[in-house]
Image: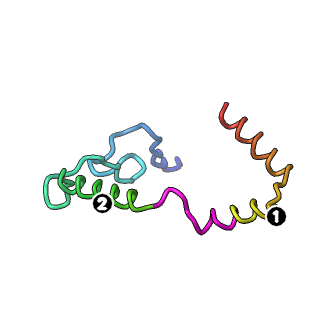
Amino acid sequence: MKKPKKPKKRRPGTGSPSAKQNWKGVRPWSCCFLPGSGAPTLQRNDALIEQVRQIVAATPEVRPEIVEPLRQAVEQGAYEIDARKLANCLITKIILDC
């Protein structure tokens, strides 16, 4: 008596996936926006860009809460540099920039 045949397993790339899913059963990502309330608008982007510009303009270039203690330590001669740590940073920067 013959054994019943097992159904063949689908391999990647064989057959055709459904319109809503890929061959792994996962919905494909889409970068397209459908028209409607969720679609981005140019006005929203402009408002967001303007808001970011205002935040950047209001942010100081130098953070005094960090710089001031360092400045005082340098003036008093109490600021010491770890030569080994500095060398490691310089070498790392040189290697990563190449």
Dominant SS type (magenta) = helix
- Amino acid, disc 2: Gln
Residue hosting label 2: 51
Q: Position of residue 63 (x, y in %)?
A: 55, 63
User: Which quarter of the picture shows residue 91?
Assistant: top right
Tell whether 19 sits left or right of 94.
Answer: left
Tell whether 11 sits left or right of 81.
Answer: left
Q: Is residue 64 magenta?
A: yes
Q: Position of residue 72 (x, y in %)?
A: 71, 65
Residue hosting label 1: 78
Tell whether 8 sits left or right of 71.
Answer: left
Q: Badge 1: how crowded within 10 Å, few (<14), some, or many (20+)?
A: few
Mark 1: secondary structure: loop
Q: Nearer the viewer, residue 63 or 72?
A: 72
Q: Is residue 56 magenta?
A: no
Q: Badge 2: how crowded within 10 Å, few (<14), some, or many (20+)?
A: few
Residue numbers of the magenta segment: 60-70
Q: Position of residue 50 (x, y in %)?
A: 28, 56
Nearer the observer, disc 2 or disc 1?
1
Tell whether 51 sits left or right of 4.
Answer: left
Q: Position of residue 38 (x, y in %)?
A: 20, 60
* Rendered image: mark on residue 46: none
Q: Residue at x 44, y 61 (%)?
A: 59
